[in-house]
Image (cartoon, rainbow, N blue to C red):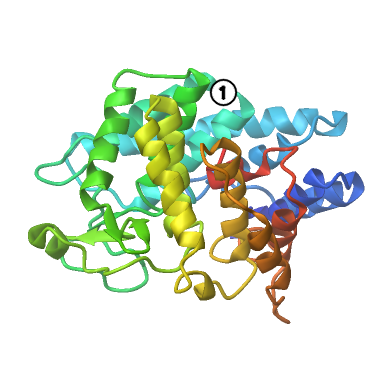
Amino acid sequence: MTAGQSLADGAAGIALWHLETGRWQAAYAALQQATADGVSATDNASLYYGVPALAFVLAASDHPALIRAQGVAAAATATVARRRLHTAHRRIDQRQQPPYAEFDLIRGLTGLGVALRRIGDLDILREVLTYLVRLTEPIGALPGWWCPHGPNRTEPGPAGGHSNHGIAHGITGPLALLALTLLDGITVDGHTQAINRVCQWLDTWQRRTSTGTWWPQTITLDDLRRGDPSQRGPLRPSWCYGTPGMARAQQLTALALGDTARQHLAESALIACLNDAAQIPQLTDRALCHGTGGLLTTARRIAVDALTPIPLAPLERLHQQAQEATDEPAGFLDGTSGAALAATGTTKTSWDACLLLC
């Protein structure tokens, strides 16, 4: 795999930063670098790699020099999505459990749905939504998104697999996309029922402590049998797996359904997270994925739609004060370009749509 075409840590993500901040020449140079060794449209292509990543980034600009590339990337993204959908539906027909790479934001069909929504291919987007509806239907006694492997694919997982809840790799990613498209007026059969199935599951595992509401990052078969998560409290307040990302998915769902109680709950969960002295110090870098950049960016989007004011100044100071590591990479998810985007506070290009925040 060639790194340039990666939205996560390659030149494609750096181009997105330059486009947001209006540096056209730098953006064009980064795009040339991203495509210099070719762009993947094979099975490893996703929102964060290959032609769908390029399609997402190109959609951030209306510059005439990009029009042809936008069309080529959009068509190739649709082809990738159709192929992945065929494989996913065949898996569901066989009543097999999915790896989260099939459906997640980073490598799966939720991410491809984000790219299709961005480029305006609503026909294929509806096909993705139809798949997500099927994903929420139970397989036996387990939810349809239950993964047979563990949260970390490179390490042995818990016996029997798990239910993943992080917005990057878990079911709150599909939930957020279903909510956003419902808000857009783009719906398919079973759309609201699928949202309600996911909400019912998350409501079952929602926990409240003296510091506020939170959701476990994963649930295992042992947790399911016990009726209680082995995770005893909220962990790192990251965008990818922590309360902020899950709270935004819940808030978007509440907005889509007109559910004021759920909206209050989601926003209160974020506020409790921000006020929890045990959680915030767990952020040790400036990254979007799992650092102060992701927390700040997510909180900004929640604050825009919030029923209750959410103070952002303390988070802005936290991000400013976070130390830049001497070996910090230049990329989007874990590097300097993403941290800089968070610091700008602007979303003219809706760059944070690739985080499923809008």
The quarter of the picture where residue 41 lies is: top right
Residue wearing tag 1: 121
The quarter of the picture where residue 10 lies is: bottom right
Residue for point 29% across, 22% down: 190
x then y, percent, for residue 219: 23, 59
Residue for point 53% across, 65% down: 290
Residue 206 vs residue 274, the one in the foreground? 274
Tell me: 264 left or right of 287: left
Image vertical order of residue 32 relative to residue 348, above or below: below
Q: Quadrant of the N terminus?
A: bottom right
x then y, percent, for residue 352: 63, 45
Tell me: 139 left or right of 304: left
Tell me: 227 left or right of 49: left
Q: Quadrant of the C terminus?
A: top right
Image vertical order of residue 256 relative to residue 17, above or below: above
Q: Say what secondary structure mark 1 lies in.
A: loop
x then y, percent, for residue 222: 13, 65
Callout 1 crowding tier (Cα within 10 Å): few <14, some 14–19, many ≥20: some
Image vertical order of residue 64 relative to residue 225, above or below: above
Query: Is residue 159 at least partly visible in the picture?
Result: yes
